[in-house]
Image (spheres, grey):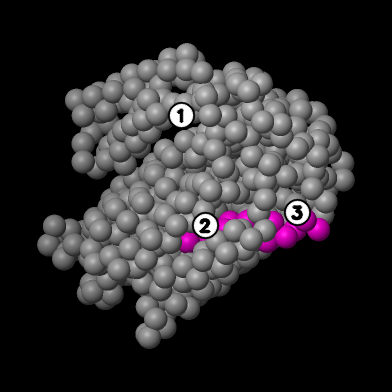
Amino acid sequence: MSAQTAAPVEAAPMDHRHVLRALSGLLIVLFVAMISVTVVSVALPRIIGELNGTQSQYTWVVTASLLASTASTPIWGKLADLFSKKLLLQISIGLFVVSSVACGFAQTTPQLIGFRAVQGLGMGALQVLVQVIIAAMISPKERGRYNGYLGGVMAVATVGGPLLGGFVTDTSWLGWRWCFFIAVPFTLIAFVILTRTLHLAEVRRPDTKVDYLGAGLIAAGVSLLLLWVTFVGDEFDWVSWQTLVMVAASVLILAAAVLVEARVKEPIVPLHVVRRRDPALAIVASLAVGMAMFGGAVFLGQYFQIGRGNTPTEAGLLTIPLMAGVLVSSTVAGRLVSKTGKVKPFIIAGVVVLTLGFLGLSQIDHETDLVLVSLGMLAVGIGVGMSMQNLVLVLQNTVPLSELGAASGSITFFRSLGGTMGVSVLGAVLAHQVSVKIAAGLAGLGIDPAKAGGGSSTLNVKALPPEIQEVVRAAYGDATGHIFLISAAIALVGVVASLFLTPTKLRDSVDL
């Protein structure tokens, strides 16, 4: 790396008062990025229903933003090593504001999917840049305490988001479009605060270049793979020429990306970092946690509204155990990590509880006692809160300040990749299970599924005849358990990876 040509960087950590001033703006940014997901998640069944969308389009409204966020995350992380972190954050805030307004004005489902993809670019930038900037100010050991603040904001966004989304969606003079508009004023406030309070010692490296070829190959390879995951089993068979072409092309493109990243001076994904034991294990665990968590949790709102007939507001209230688990566990674990300097025990405990939570949720159907559903969600929330941010700490603890952006971007990339794959895979499984169960239910009523008015493809359940409504609700409620069983199996991979982490102590300096 060309760190020798860089201007000197102040490695001493800022005092608590100055950190909190800058952190307030960063926390608002994180809050906005997260609430843009949680506010919309509970409203999606209503949104897709009113726009006459299908189950596949429901999945793509989520996947589009995650895909764009995933593909761009390594680029934002690398740019943060080369250019002004503050300027990049301001640019990403502007991109997020414009795309949020565009989403609110979408008139069709394809339009919404397109605008969500642009919004995903801003979301990916905000998430990785907040982590990079915090890491540039605070040592890994002290960062555990501040991760408690991050966990609190994440929990408020995730708890308040569904409640706010349900309220906005159910309020006639607001409507679901305000689920997108509502993030704009918060984002603008954050922009002003950060402009005034964020002052970083920047590393000036005018001799460096951005690896656009590697970034393009990574984005293309991942995107093609996710497109295959989304359409296989529905648009074409698992064993087909389409599968051969898409998978082979994706493998070749990603192989070319690895070759490029191994040879360029400034790689988007630093292979010398991700090849080390602990960073590699942390990435594998993060990918598994992201795939299980995002893939499973994104369909909970759909389970409550379609499978159990709840309103958006009720669905938001019912997801509180999940968010409460994140709040409590992330705050407590963050403080204990700062106090002890140890992170491995909390990660292992987190992924084990996460796996058990998904195993519990795998038993649900459309008539399961809500207490049992709540206990499963609480366990999932606790597991996520204990493991997700601490896995980032494992990677950040092994790299110098000059590589912090690329390293943080790498683990965020793989976690987002896992989430995107999780949504795509589990969405495809859910759509298939729902289709089979609806067809069987309609046949039991003596109704030809082909003449049932689109009962197996539309999410506008209220437009269906009452007897078909019941069949659709039962199908969605009963099929959801299958995707949580898959989530549990994926989370188990995270357990195995976490067990092999080296039990090291976190350093107490910003730089190595």
Which sits in the foreground, 5 or 222?
5
- Left or right: 141 in relation to 23: right
- Left or right: 333 in relation to 494: right
> Would you name the residue on which mark 3 appears?
19
In the image, residue 225 lies at what x, y percent?
34, 32
Residue under the image location 44 percent in, 45 percent down: 69
Image: magenta residue range? 17-38
- Mark nearer the N terminus (1 vs 3): 3
Q: Is residue 21 magenta?
A: yes
C-alpha gap between disc 1 and disc 3: 30 Å
What residue type is disc 2 on?
Ala
Asked if disc 2 and disc 3 are in contact, CB closer than 8 Å, the reply is no
Asked if residue 317 shows in the view, the reply is: yes
- Mark nearer the N terminus (2 vs 3): 3
Which sits in the foreground, 298 or 40?
40
In the image, residue 265 lies at what x, y percent?
51, 18
> Would you name the residue on which mark 2 appears?
33
Q: Is residue 449 magenta?
A: no
- Left or right: 356 in relation to 305: right
Where disc 3 sits, the SS reads: helix
> Would you name the residue on which mark 1 appears?
210
In the image, residue 368 lies at what x, y percent?
52, 64
